[in-house]
Image (cartoon, coloured by chain):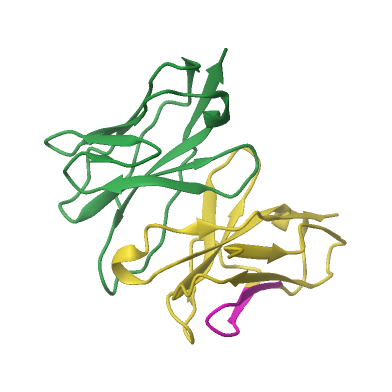
Amino acid sequence: DAKTTQPTSMDCAEGRAANLPCNHSTISGNEYVYWYRQIHSQGPQYIIHGLKNNETNEMASLIITEDRKSSTLILPHATLRDTAVYYCIVRVDGAGTASKLTFGTGTRLQVTL
Amino acid sequence: NAGVTQTPKFQVLKTGQSMTLQCAQDMNHNSMYWYRQDPGMGLRLIYYSASEGTTDKGEVPNGYNVSRLNKREFSLRLESAAPSQTSVYFCASSFAGGGGGKQYFGPGTRLTVT
């Protein structure tokens, strides 16, 4: 699986959009971009994933650049409850593949009043 | 629908003791996983079971054994605990194949080995 690079930490004011970048310059054509978050010491929580098109769900939006070498997770209106460590993971999907996730150290997002 | 449950929540062991961490899921998932997380680090995969009846080593399998008891349950055993195994252990589950990247995690077991 391709390696990812994320900033160590970021701050965001409550109510503003939080934009979390991820670099995955060695991504290959069949690798998806996944985002998870971990609030305090709870188990990680799936947020969103995509291959090359932008994706949106009730939690967030995922913007993937045209060359797929980087992506941005957007939390449109951050709240204090969004304070967490956010992990960007790249992996191959598809029938027959081992579904292993490789977690780096992620980005610690602090949402403040 | 409880999702992924883990027992116990906390455990303290002495060096050399053994124990089994239990994990169960009620989402009819095919695949199950065990991860460990050391302070300030990301999660690392210990073992996984792609489907009932199969198990495979992950990134850090040494010192651990697993059993996929049935489709719902996946246990992790420490035969002779060492201080280096002090960590938080997370179990996860997912559908196999194309859905496997979307994993559901349990609340974790916090293990201290003295």
Q: Residue furthest left?
A: A66
Q: Is residue A38 magenta?
A: no
Residue at 27% x, 61% y is: A93
Q: Which chain is yellow?
A: B
Please tell me which residue lies in front, A49 or B26. Answer: B26
Residue B59: x percent and y percent? 49, 61
Q: Is residue B73 magenta?
A: yes
Image quadrant containing the C terminus of chain B: bottom right
**Image height of A3 relative to B22, above or below:** above
Residue at 68% x, 64% y is: B6
B106 relative to B28 in the view: left or right:
right
Residue at 36% x, 34% y is: A5
Give the residues in magenta. B65-77
Q: Is residue A34 visible?
A: no
Image quadrant containing the N terminus of chain B: bottom right
In the figure, the shade used to draw chain A is: green
